[in-house]
Amino acid sequence: MSDEKFQIKPEVEKAIVDFRENQKEKSFSSRHPELGKMVKCQVCSRRHRTFEICLQTFAKDKNEIELVAKGYGHGKGRRTRHWNKRSLELVDLTRRLILFYSNGQDDFKKARSRALNLLRKKWHARSVRIQRQQKLSRRINRG
C-alpha cells in the first residue's frame, strides 16, 4: 500500500464540523432519540424512559375479584385499623375498672359503661373549658 493521504472534500469537512458543533449543544436525549424521553411515572413513582410501560395492578381476593379502595392512598384499606385516641382511653380505663368488679360478662359490660360515662364527663368538661377560654379571648379582643 502506498502512503497516500485520504482526501476529504471541503463540503464534507464542513458538514462534519457543523455536525460536531450541533452535537455539543444537544442534550443526551436529543443525541440519542432511540432511548426516548425520561418521565416521572405516576404508576411506579420513579423516573424511567417512555418506552418502559408500567401497568397498574389492583389487589384481588381469593375469587379474583378486585377489592374496592377504601380511602385515599390505601389500596385495600387496613385489615386491623389503628385505634383512635378516645377508643384507646376507653380500653385502658375499662381494663383498670374491671379489677373492681367480681366476675362474668355482665361485670365487663358494667365496667365498660362506667368507663364510658367517666370519659364522657371528662371530654365534656374539656370542651366546656375550651369554650369558656374562647369566650373570654373574644371578649378581650373585642376591646
Image (tube, helix red, strand yellow):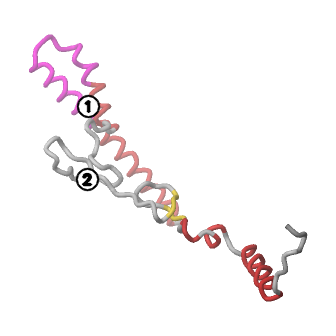
Q: Quadrant of residue 121?
A: top left
Is 112 inside the magenta-drawn segment? yes
SS under mark 1: helix
Look at the numbered discs 2 and 1 and tell me whether their residues touch, using CB distance below 8 Å: no
Mark 2 = which residue?
A: 69
The residue at the point 28 percent across, 38 percent down is 81
Identify the element where label 2 is drawn: loop
Residue type, label 1? Leu
69 in magenta: no
Q: Percent from the top left, x then y, of residue 74?
A: 32, 49
Amino acid type, mark 2: Ala
Q: Left or right? Give the position of 48 relative to 119.
A: right
Q: Main secondary structure of the magenta part?
A: helix
Q: CA distance from mark 2 to mark 1?
A: 37 Å
Residue 133 percent coordinates (x, y)? 44, 51
Dot label at residue 25: none
**Residue that numbered label 1 is attached to:** 118
- Residue placed most toward the observer, 64 or 117: 64
Residue range corresponding to the magenta coloring: 94-120
